[in-house]
Image (tube, rainbow, N blue to C red):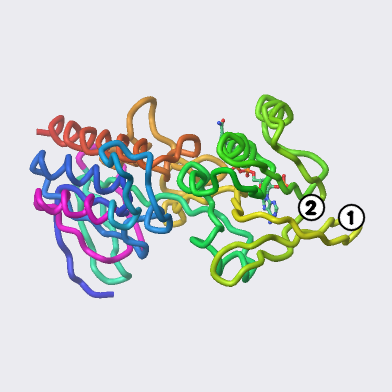
Amino acid sequence: MSDTIERIKCLIIGSGPAGYSAAIYAARADLKPVMYTGLQMGGQLTTTTEVDNYPGYPNGTDGTAMMEDFKNQAERFDTEVRFGIATKVEFDNSVGGIHKITIDNSKIIEAETVIISTGATAKYLGIESEQRLIGGGVSACATCDGFFYKGQDVVVIGAGDTAAEEATYLANICRKVTILVRKDFMRASKAMQHRVEKTENIEVMFHTELDEVMGESVVEGVRVFNNQTDEKQTLDVTGVFVAIGHQPNTEIFKDVLDMDEVGYLITKGKSTKTNLPGVFAAGDVQDNEYRQAVTAAGTGCMAALDAERYLGSLA
Ligand code: NDP
């Protein structure tokens, strides 16, 4: 390990809407933030096409372009945006303590405050045709991409609250939504299941799994199979929404920060404070409920304000 050490006031880990919003606010508060972007610069939004639900873009924008705007705005206020990933953390648990974060297994950052905005990663099934068609009709976000399937037929894969919620959202836009459930029941809350049952253009296929997504560059249908009878059938759909859960990107914080059973960081009350002083969490890494760019940006702003107030309280 190299001995490059740098001391800063505010380190931001992750470059989605939460990270950049934190950066804009932290920079304007003169915390001279340094951001490490992570491998996927710009976060999950760079995997979607058009973003039509972020306020301020009346004609919609493209996810990657929007994150470039976020980055430019953060840099305008002298945020230092660096490509790299945090590989190890040694957080101090005393008020006013210095947190040590190793970047790319080599450089050490000593930070007075840390804002964690490492996001979450949508889970996919992992089959070849599904992976190939991500962005070409396969999506893990109905609120991001559902609009493009207006009047069309789509499938949703999963049986939890996300699947039920995505299906009812899509049912308002699409002609027909078919939910593929691998067991003989949905694990979504009863209330969500009632909504699904009451929605006329949703069909639930139990004991049914995806075999293949058809199409070369865009989805032209799916082949599914009944896992009891092995019977296969083709569904004529143009969109495939995978809703089998998200995995928060919190591996390096295990046994260090409080997290729930899935791995989402736990923040205190309405704040972005974690269980350690000077360490804050914003965006999807601490939110398994709303998971929107605009809510992530909101908590990013909160994290910067929390960091600023924390430093102010030490003075
Ligand atoms: P969950 O982990 O609750 O559900 C994932 C679903 O995906 C399960 O039904 C699971 O099936 C299914 N699944 C997993 N792997 C596969 C696979 N390989 N093939 C087919 N199906 C698969 O994740 P959610 O994202 O739905 O929810 C996460 C948390 O967020 C939950 O606590 C949920 O309550 C909460 N949430 C709350 C909402 C709200 O209150 N409005 C909205 C959305 C989420 P199986 O059942 O067979 O294991």
User: Mark 1 falls on what kind of element?
Assistant: loop
Describe residue 245's horizontal placement relative to residue 48 as left or right.
right
Q: Residue at x 28, y 51 (%)?
A: 66
Describe residue 226's horizontal placement relative to residue 307 as left or right.
right
Q: Position of residue 241 (x, y in %)?
A: 59, 51
Disc count in the image? Answer: 2
Q: Residue at x 30, y 43 (%)?
A: 59
- Region in magenta: 67-96
Pointer 1 residue: 228
The verdict on residue 231 being magenta is no
Quadrant of image for the C terminus: top left
Locate ligand 1 by image quadrant. Answer: top right
**Kind of residue sitting beneath label 1:** Gln
The relative height of residue 292 versus residue 47 in the rendered view (above or below) is above
Q: Earlier in the sequence, mark 1 or mark 2?
A: 2
Q: Residue at x 62, y 68 (%)?
A: 215
Q: Position of residue 37 (x, y in %)?
A: 29, 59
User: Pointer 1: residues within 10 angstroms few (<14), some, or many (20+)?
Assistant: few
Q: Position of residue 114 (x, y in %)?
A: 26, 47
**Which label is found at residue 208?**
2
**Kind of residue sitting beneath label 2:** Thr
Q: Residue furthest right?
A: 229
Q: Position of residue 164 (x, y in %)?
A: 64, 37
Give 125 or 237, whichever is nearer the viewer: 237
Displayed quadrant of residue 100 = bottom left
